[in-house]
Image: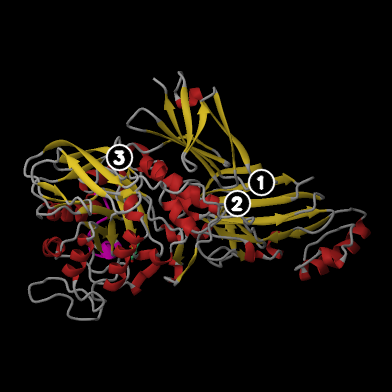
């Protein structure tokens, strides 16, 4: 060990978990005394690295993340830590540490020109040093940070905001000079937070929820269950429905077909023993579906390859029984794993029609079951020969499959790239677009509407063209696989998705993946469910972020295990109204710093939805000014989670926001 000198001898209890360091430090004391210098050093690689996170692989002492010798720009290093963006570690100090020094950069073995990272050193939640963006092949950058007074040090490696592909990062020759207790890594544990339900329960009087605008193609089957809260029984009425549609006045389900294109302005009514309500509803009969972001549930993050037809029927029952459908959740979507698995021949019947596996004995029956409740049915396949889970894909059977999905009665298709790369024949834009254009064309030919969700993780800047092909497009990799570093994975996915705000519009939405809250299975091992590890404030941030981004609100936790907190989180009508606003604009980024993220979403009635996200590890007063919001006249402010008026907007709006929490407000100009 390279401890050179020190002057403090620690009491035993002040040096947990530091066997090697202790011996070295004692040796250093002796050496230091001999040299007459009073400081000790310990290298980062000598600390316990189990608390260090990495976006891929496991941080390595004295080796790169791929276990090669550490090397930066041709210079080799014997000592240091190899990691991978996003990476993070917290180190506890006693205020007497002196220096942290290192040489940093992208490891030479990353051998990929796209690798780029940024190193950040923070002390007590203040940034102390930042490397700037480092690229592959560059010489190491010198990091020398004074630590006097610092008690909590954070070493972070970001992906430099361009994805973490090949981001092999080295803290080479990284060491601490200290005078008091030796530095030690600590596991960051979120402080315990009470799961406070912020939203008042829906009143017993009827309240009509859900989108105010709805798209359907001429002649396609129309199915819409009026989302309405309030004591049952409820009675419904609809005035000025277009010809061809009828409303069942007890179930509130509208069915039928509209032959003629046009915009129809209907009025919906609901009544119960305690009162009545009405709401405008625009039915746009034309070529556009999903005029507001789709809302529903998907099986992936809880049932994985365990999904069955029975699970799907139960999910439909639970969507109604839980009350979620009364807030606008309507799609009940099977993800991967409903077809035959590789090896389980035959995959298709003699006409080429794809065969579901034995877990799905009756696909048309399943769709009919879901429809009978006024809900919609969704399913999944891949343009490749195999899905990501190794089940049969649609490759070279696109027309047959599209027809079959429509015949079965499905209303939504997620089309997941998976194995398509093996047959794509190229990776330029045209090759990336081709399979999606092909399936879009086949879906167009069907006599029922299928909302089309592109899932190819953002390739070819899909946000620039996805709207010409489908109704929504995933902008990133899987949210369930996004690793925690400083912040839980949904923030990284959210920040990335937020950048494409200008591309979202009615019928065409950025899709940052599902709502992983409540009872969810760990995606890394396709595991059984367990309660989310997100804190309550992080969950409020998650739903706020998705709503401000006009993201599809697709829950993917266990519908059978919805607790009161999760249900409240998913079912705040005013938060959902931000997501479902008919103007269809995605929130624009007003501010993004290490500690703050601010989004502003214009709404159809001239109001603004504003989200102030505190990314710091402690509460913080966050502000936004009238000027920043582009407002001058009087306006009133409403807290959307609490559904409570906050009063008139002052020149500067200042709000205390909890750790990793959010203030989600609606600012309504009074004109
Ligand atoms: C991934 C996709 C996930 C899930 C999974 C199924 O590619 O992004 O959302 O569908 O495949 O295998």
Marks 1 and 2, how far apart in space? Answer: 8 Å
Task: Answer yes or no: is residue 162 visible.
Answer: no
Q: Which tag is nearer the camera, tag 2 or tag 3?
A: 3
* Cβ–Cβ under 8 Å for marks 1 and 2: yes
What residue does disc 3 label? 277
The first of marks 3 and 1 along the sequence is 1
Instruction: Decide: is 501 above or below 32.
Output: above
Q: Which mark is residue 529?
A: none
User: Callout 2 environment at 10 Å: few (<14), some (14 to 19), or many (20+)?
Assistant: many
What residue does disc 1 label? 122
Question: Which of 41/448 is in front?
Answer: 448
Which stretch did the figure color magenta? 418-429
* Cβ–Cβ under 8 Å for marks 3 and 1: no
User: Callout 3 environment at 10 Å: few (<14), some (14 to 19), or many (20+)?
Assistant: some
What residue does disc 2 label? 156
Quarter the N terminus occupies: bottom right
**Is residue 578 covered in magenta?**
no
The picture places residue 483, in percent across and down from the top left corner, at: 50, 59
The first of marks 2 and 3 along the sequence is 2
The picture places residue 283, in percent across and down from the top left corner, at: 18, 40
Secondary structure, mark 2, is: strand
Secondary structure, mark 1, is: strand
Tell whether 603 sits left or right of 635: left
Question: Which of 183/293 is in front?
Answer: 293
The picture places residue 327, in percent across and down from the top left corner, at: 34, 49
Q: What is the tally of numbered marks visible in this picture?
A: 3
Ligand 1 visible in quadrant: bottom left
């Amino acid at each position: 060990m390279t401890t050179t000198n020190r002057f403090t001898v620690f009491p035993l209890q002040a040096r947990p978990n530091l066997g090697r360091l202790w011996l070295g430090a004692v040796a250093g004391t002796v050496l230091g005394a001999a040299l007459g210098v009073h400081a000790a050093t310990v290298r980062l690689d000598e600390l316990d690295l189990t608390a260090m996170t990495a976006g891929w692989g496991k941080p390595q002492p004295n080796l790169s993340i791929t276990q090669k010798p550490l090397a930066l720009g041709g210079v080799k290093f014997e000592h240091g830590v190899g990691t991978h963006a996003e990476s993070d570690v917290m180190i506890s100090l006693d205020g007497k540490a002196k220096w942290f020094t290192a040489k940093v950069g992208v490891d030479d073995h990353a051998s990929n020109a796209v690798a780029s990272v940024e190193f950040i050193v923070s002390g007590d939640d203040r940034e102390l040093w930042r490397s700037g963006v480092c690229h592959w092949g560059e010489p190491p950058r010198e990091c020398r940070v004074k630590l006097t007074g610092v008690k909590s040090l954070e070493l972070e490696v970001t992906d430099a905001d361009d994805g973490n592909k090949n981001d092999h990062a080295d803290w080479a020759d990284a060491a601490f000079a200290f005078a008091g207790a030796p530095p030690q890594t600590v596991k960051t544990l979120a402080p315990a937070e009470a799961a406070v339900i912020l939203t008042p329960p829906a009143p017993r009087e009827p309240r009509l929820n859900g989108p105010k605008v709805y798209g359907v193609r001429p002649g396609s089957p129309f199915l819409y269950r009026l989302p309405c809260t309030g004591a049952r029984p409820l009675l419904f009425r609809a005035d000025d429905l277009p010809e061809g549609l009828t409303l069942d006045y007890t179930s509130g389900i509208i069915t039928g077909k509209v032959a003629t294109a046009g915009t129809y302005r209907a009025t919906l009514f609901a009544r119960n023993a305690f009162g009545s309500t009405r709401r405008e509803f625009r039915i746009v009969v034309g070529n556009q579906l999903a005029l507001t972001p789709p809302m529903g549930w998907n099986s992936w993050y809880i049932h994985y390859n365990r999904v069955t037809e029975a699970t799907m029927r139960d999910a439909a029952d639970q969507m109604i029984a839980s009350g979620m459908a009364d807030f606008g959740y309507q799609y009940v979507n099977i993800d991967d794993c409903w077809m035959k698995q590789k090896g389980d021949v035959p995959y298709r019947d003699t006409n080429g029609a794809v065969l579901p596996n034995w877990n799905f004995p009756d696909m048309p029956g399943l769709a009919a079951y879901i429809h009978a409740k006024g809900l919609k049915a969704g399913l999944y396949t891949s343009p490749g020969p195999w899905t990501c889970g190794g089940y049969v894909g649609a490759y070279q059977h696109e027309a047959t499959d599209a027809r079959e999905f429509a015949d079965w009665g499905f209303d939504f298709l997620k089309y997941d790239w998976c194995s398509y790369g093996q047959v794509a024949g190229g990776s330029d834009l045209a090759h990336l677009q081709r399979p999606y254009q092909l399936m879009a064309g086949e879906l167009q030919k069907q006599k029922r509407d299928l909302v089309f969700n592109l899932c190819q993780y953002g390739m070819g800047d899909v946000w620039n063209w996805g709207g010409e092909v489908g109704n929504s497009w995933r902008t990133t990799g899987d949210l369930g696989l996004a690793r925690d570093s400083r912040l839980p994975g949904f923030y990284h996915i959210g920040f990335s998705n937020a950048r494409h705000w200008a591309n979202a519009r009615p019928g065409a939405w950025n899709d940052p993946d599902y709502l992983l809250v409540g009872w969810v299975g760990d995606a890394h091992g396709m595991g059984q469910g367990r309660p989310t590890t997100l804190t309550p404030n992080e969950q409020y941030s998650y739903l706020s972020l998705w709503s401000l981004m006009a993201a599809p609100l697709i829950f993917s936790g266990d519908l059978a295990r919805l607790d009161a907190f999760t249900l409240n989180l998913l079912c705040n009508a005013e938060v959902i109204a931000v997501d479902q606003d008919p103007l269809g604009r995605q929130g624009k980024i007003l501010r993004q710093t290490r500690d703050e993220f601010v989004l502003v979403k214009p709404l159809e009635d001239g109001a603004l939805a504003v989200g102030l996200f505190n990314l710091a590890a402690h509460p913080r007063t966050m502000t936004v000014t009238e000027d920043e919001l582009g407002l001058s006249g009087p306006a009133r402010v409403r807290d959307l989670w609490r559904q409570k008026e906050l009063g008139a907007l002052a020149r500067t709006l200042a709000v205390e926001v909890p750790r990793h929490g959010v203030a989600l407000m609606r600012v309504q100009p009074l004109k």
